[in-house]
Amino acid sequence: MFTQINSKMVEAPVSPGQRLFSQRGAMLAYKGDVSFTPDLMGGQGGVGSMLGRRLANEDTPLMTVEGNGTVMFGHGGHHAHLIHLTGDTLYVEADRLLVFEGSLQQSTMFMGSQGGLRGIIRGQATGQGLFTTTLTGHGSAAVLAHGGVFEIPITPQRPVHVDPQAYVAHRGEVQSKVSTAIGWRDAIGRGSGEAFQLELTGNGTVFVQASEEKL
Amino acid sequence: MQGSRVLAVDLTGDTVKARNGSMVAYDGQMSFKRMTGGGEGLRGLVTRRITGEKMTVMEVQGQGTCWFAERAAEINLVRLNGERLHVEANNLLCTEATLRTGTEFTGLRGASEGHGLFTTKVEGSGWAAITSDGPAVILRVAPGLPLRVDPGAYVAHTGDLKQNFRTDVTWRALVGETGGESFQIEFEGNGLVYVQPSERRTVAGEV
């Protein structure tokens, strides 16, 4: 279980048989006997998963953290947000993942499979590409965001629209698609700056950062 | 308010004016419409063009909750009851539709702050949200107790205040040996001044 030290640092325990995966170079300090090995595979799975990630451009350099002790993580002065998963799935961009427990199953998902052509447009419009990383299982993960993160619950009666640049991650049974509100105003360059939105429907939570800046 | 960097606005069919592109999320039904010239009519448009206090504002209308944020800046809520808020267009995030906005001449002070000779004024009754780089402190100015502020740290002020521009330039400044605080704005009168814990790069800061 991770603990939040302050808004920008998290502390994670490591014990034999319970390893962590973290963004390479994100370790700030550690206590105990801990070793860090660069993960050529870029995460879990075999060579197949590695190739998948390479192709999908979701291959942020990771490292494996093993041993016995506690490690503190932080990166670039960005805010770190803890998410505890209890059997559900977290969808997040690979470069936003700070650290996650080895008990979580990591894989790469093709966004096009969620919503077909619209999904592809979604990836392009939001600048997130066609693929995203998923984490499934029981355990903790920490994600990075510029500015603080706040959570908005999504229920079937209450779809939520998010600015693609402020979107961080989401969890649960959620469908996402790009909704456009392009009118003649945008065509002549008089738009409100909110022409593209991510529309999230279903059951779950979306994590939104207080800024429209990418990491 | 949610945290100090995100502003949540509950709308029930009413309207708010917000900076273009500052919406981060919403639920319910919302429509966003850009208002040409800051929603001040043709005269306002022309004035803003000339003065360079450009402000692209959108009108948000609908049912539900809308969240606003701007580059992770801290957000301060200001309640106006008929008085006037003076703020830089860059620091104004969101205002209720009941508030009127306009431009005004500031003179030399504006030039020293590095954002031009003009500033934005907000009048009426309602809430306004202003952004600051780091949490802003609110300093009270009373008669006989003038306040001096670094031009780069000044965010906004309300009340009946007279501004003076103060210089402290000596021969040291000319040879490049200064404390970096050669220029200040002096506020006199009765009112509140919002100061941020960070300094913009200004002409005054260079000297």
Image: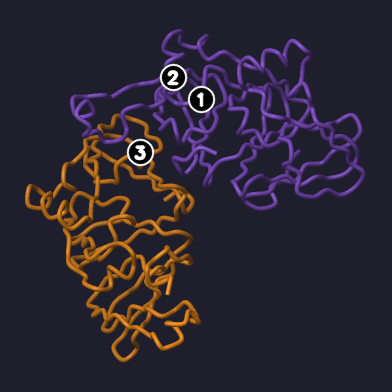
Disc 3 designates what residue?
A: B65
In the displayed orientation, state which residue is furthest to the left.
B43
Residue at the location (30% across, 50% down)?
B94
Amino acid marked by disc 2: Arg
Q: Quadrant of residue A41?
A: top right
**Residue sitting nearer the eye, A23 or A167:** A23
Specify the label residue A122 is tagged with: 2
Residue at the location (46% across, 14% down)?
A119
Residue at the location (37% across, 79% down)?
B184
Residue B124 position within the rendered picture, expressed as x and y whole percent measured from the top left: 17, 61
Amino acid marked by disc 1: Gln
Q: Regarding mark 2 in the picture, which secondary structure is present there?
A: helix
Q: Residues within 10 Å of mark 3 (few under 14, many from 20)?
A: some
Mark 3 belongs to chain:
B
- Please state which of the two labelled residues, at mark 2 or mark 3, is closer to the viewer: 2
Specify the label residue A128 is tagged with: 1
Q: Residues within 10 Å of mark 2 (few under 14, many from 20)?
A: many
The colour scheme used to paint the residues is: by chain
Residue B31 position within the rendered picture, expressed as x and y whole percent measured from the top left: 25, 32
Whether residue A95 sits left or right of residue B67 in the image: it is: right
Mark 2 belongs to chain:
A
* Chain displayed in orange: B
Q: Is B49 above or below relative to B103?
A: above
